[in-house]
Image: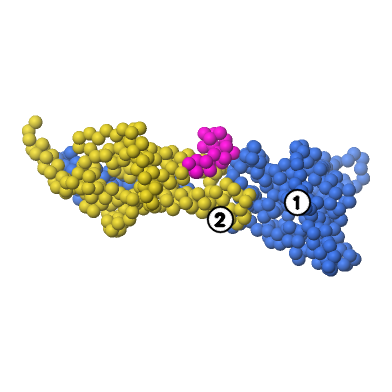
Amino acid sequence: MSSSVDRFDSRARGDFARMGQTRVHRGELLRHPTYTRFLHWSVAIFFILSLLSGFAIYSAWLFRWLTPVFGGGARTRALHPWFGLLFAIFFLFQFINWFGPMAWTAADSKFTRRLKEYATNRYDLESEDTGFFNGGQKIYFWTIAVCAVLFLITGLLMWFDHLVARWLIVVSYVVHDLAALVMLAGFIIHVYEGTAHQPGTFRSMINGTVTEKWAWTHHPAWYRAVTGRDPRDAYEQEKRRLAEREGRPE
Amino acid sequence: MANPQMFQIQEISAHPGPVPGAGTRREEQVCKYIDVSTCIGCKACEVACVEWNDHPFRETTFNDTYQTMPSTEWNYWNLIKFAEDSRDGNLMWLMRKDQCMHCEDPGCLRACPADGAIIKYQNGIVDFQQDNCIGCGYCISGCPFDIPKFNEKTKKVYKCTLCSDRVGQGLEPACIKSCPTGCLHFGTKTDMVQIASTRAKQLREQSGFADAGVYDPGSIGGTHVIYVLHDIKNPERYGLPANPVIPPSYTYWRWLAKPTGLMLAVVGVAAVFFHRVFYGPKMPQPEDLPVVETRPEDEIDAGRKERP
């Protein structure tokens, strides 16, 4: 990232931090500042609007019940590219915002090798070199980045279809659909991981904070970086504290 | 649409012998036949189309030809295309009336995702139902003849109806009625192919057009608008595709891959739900209530046994 983009990014973070506020209580860590949260939900809102209006085009015969929400079939179709464009714009800012921490590392390769164990809850504590994002989150981020580019290119071709050759439009429809299906799969997993599968995660995008416990469990290297404490030591200490409390008569 | 069979005579009083015409059936497949060799480019059909379909008067576009505008429009369904070609070193002016071809296997209908937006009648007419149209534009890319056109105001797509409203009442399409040279014909598909073949033969044998023939492309199952062309070997000279095709994505992708993709999405939602049921949550560690037993070996017995 060039320095002017960096400057823009840090200025935006500063402006949003002044506009909003994030309260970090004792035993909590700041995970997502106001700017990140704003971008995440802007992307999410326009993704969901694109998804719903997209369903009404993807299989209009099946999803015609969705169209009254947008003012009828033709209006749904007319709004869809605008939803998509706003999704792409907000994601561009999120991309700039997260480009750094989303860089792939050796720890992420290790994470993907242990993906099966991760998915079946075979271990409680994440590998100690797992940083701010784990390998799975990075895969989702880069999938969105690639899909967003595909969406944008094919979407613009279809939007200005009178300027483009017929075969290009036909190919665009298929590529747009494929990108949508890949995104949908990622979206289902993303929502599940952020809510039901990992309690304590969703609040990071609402309040902006997570508990220290959550941090040393799921992102130990990040915990070490922000607190300076060893995540395993912190875990053992907390375990001893709980055991003592358990042993002590009420 | 009045059913013609309702008015077929069944019995006749005091009539000797069988009822005339008993058992005859009217052929349903209609067809428009255009003989480009007798078209004089008068554009009466263009005007008749605009008038009958109540289209607004619109500006024409001059681009150094006699053509009214470069291509058909959402409210200009009938357009004579002028091409300056040559024959034996002399100018040959090709005029072809361009409109919807009413394909037997319509690419627009194959491509359309909206329930009921495009219909094909028994008689072969392909008609758009704008009430059900969502304006997605799939039909535009599905058409091998570049006929459906998008209306920016209504956000819907329009094209020639072969005057289905007139044909339903037993009338010929408006363009046919207006043609002064008789180069436009309308009738059953069998009759039109017959007349067109005769005309093509006449052009071949008596007028020196050795390659004259009937344009009724088999790659899309034939069309309900057929042409007699001077040169059937090169329909591109008239701006017609030699082998019009519907992109395969509108059959395989639409009816196989797309529903499969949706099904997978439903399976995906079910998968994460049952993942939660099977494996439970990943709690921040250590948990307040420590785990006593992760996976009891005798899970079934444990429930049955009474604990002391």
Residue A247 in the figure: left or right of residue B45: left
Secondary structure of the residue carrying numbered label 2: helix
Residue shown at the point (86%, 56%) measured from the top left? B38
Give the letter of the blue chain. B
Question: What shade has chain A been given?
Answer: yellow
Q: B195 or A160, which lies in front?
A: A160
Q: Which mark is residue B211?
A: none
The amino acid beneath tag 1 is: Asn
Magenta portion: prevailing SS class: helix
Residue A122 location, x and y as percent?
A: 24, 52
Residue at the farthest top position: A250
Magenta segment includes A85: yes
* Residue of label 2: A171
Residue shown at the point (50%, 49%) measured from the top left? A152
Magenta segment includes A171: no
* Residue of label 1: B63
Q: CA distance from mark 2 to mark 1?
A: 31 Å
On what subunit does the disc labeled 2 rest? A
Q: Residues within 10 Å of mark 2 (few under 14, many from 20)?
A: few
Residue B267 location, x and y as percent?
A: 41, 48
Q: Which residues are magenta?
A: A64-86
